[in-house]
Image (cartoon, helix red, strand yellow):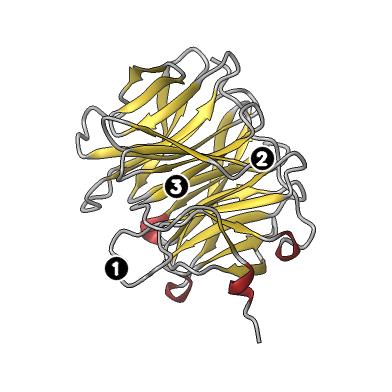
Amino acid sequence: MSSPLDTILRRTPPGAALGEGLLWSRRDACVYWVDILGNKLHAYYLADGSSKTWYFPEHIGWVIERQQGGFIAGLMSGFYELRLDPFILKHIANPFPHEPGNRLNDAKADDQGRIWAGSMHKPQTQKSGALYRLDTDLTHREIDGPYQVANGPTFSPDHSKIYHTDSGENDVFVFDIEGGEAVNKRLFVHFPDEWGSPDGMTTDAQGGIWIAHWGGGKVSRFRPDASLDFSVELPAKQITNICFAGDKLDRVFVTSAAVDQPADREAGTLFEIPSELLRGHTGLEPQKFGG
């Protein structure tokens, strides 16, 4: 008898030390994702399954498209302007000069063209992470903290709420967005230890919140009332991020990590969840940075 794990699609070979930072690009018809610890940005092209890789001088956590072209990237030392062809990397700002051991970790843009990004202490020996916002005039400020591992921001479909995670504490929080500001922070869901830790997140068009389980080997969909809808098991244990992609936003890609998992043969693979396991849910178009 076949297992649901047998239907999961392997889109790259295993081995990414810390796959993360998924982004669907309609402009480039590909899914971008990073290997944070490998200092790499990858593109997986949906039309033919080909891939391309760019190398960076330090850890890279994510890229987000700019309305004017190119990207904003989150690196170890802060926010950068990025173009890939030709390759141009220009520093914008370091939001945590007082924390030299920190790095940017995960981010998304909102419907006002701003980027909300979390940070973490790279050795994870202190709780010095925070949630920052990069505004369209390229200024930034700290929104909330401290976090042990600030992770996975995602927004409700109407952008009236932002969900944000402290993976180190197994907590997912939700804020209201009023007047463009995050207010009324409260706990959305706490992961018991047997679930692993909440990592990257995305929201579907129907309002469900999809959360990757680091150490739990799955992704789960939660309803807006925080009740668990269903989970999809994956062949690797350390699942890190998830995004909807494709012309109809009806394809789902998932990253994983091989770090500290020598016995996990599929760790560090980019997976695709087959459509029959999505139960009809579709994604939201990623927002672009407006600056």
Tell me residue 173's x, y (percent).
Answer: 52, 51
Residue 20: which numbered mark, if any? 3
Residue type, mark 3 in image: Glu
Image quarter for residue 46?
Answer: top right
Of circles 3 and 1, the one toward us is: 1
Q: Residue at x 71, y 45 (%)?
A: 283
Is residue 235 among the parts visible in the rendering?
yes
Q: Give residue 262's mark.
A: 1
> Position of 170 compared to 122: left or right?
right
Q: What's the amino acid at mark 2?
A: Ala
- Mark 1 or 2: in front is 2
Q: Is residue 203 above or below residue 289?
A: below
Residue positioned most to the right:
280
Question: Alpha carbon of mark 1 to alpha carbon of mark 2: how far?
Answer: 32 Å
Measure the alpha-carbon separation of dots 3 and 1: 19 Å
Q: CA distance from mark 2 to mark 3?
A: 22 Å
Q: Which of pointers 3 and 1 lies earlier in the amino acid sequence? A: 3
Label 2's element? Answer: loop
The residue at which mark 2 appears reads as: 47
In what element is the residue under mark 1?
A: loop
| Left or right: 79 as drawn, with respect to 276 | left
Q: Is residue 162 visible?
A: no
For marks 2 and 3, the one nearer the N-term is 3
Label 3 element class:
strand
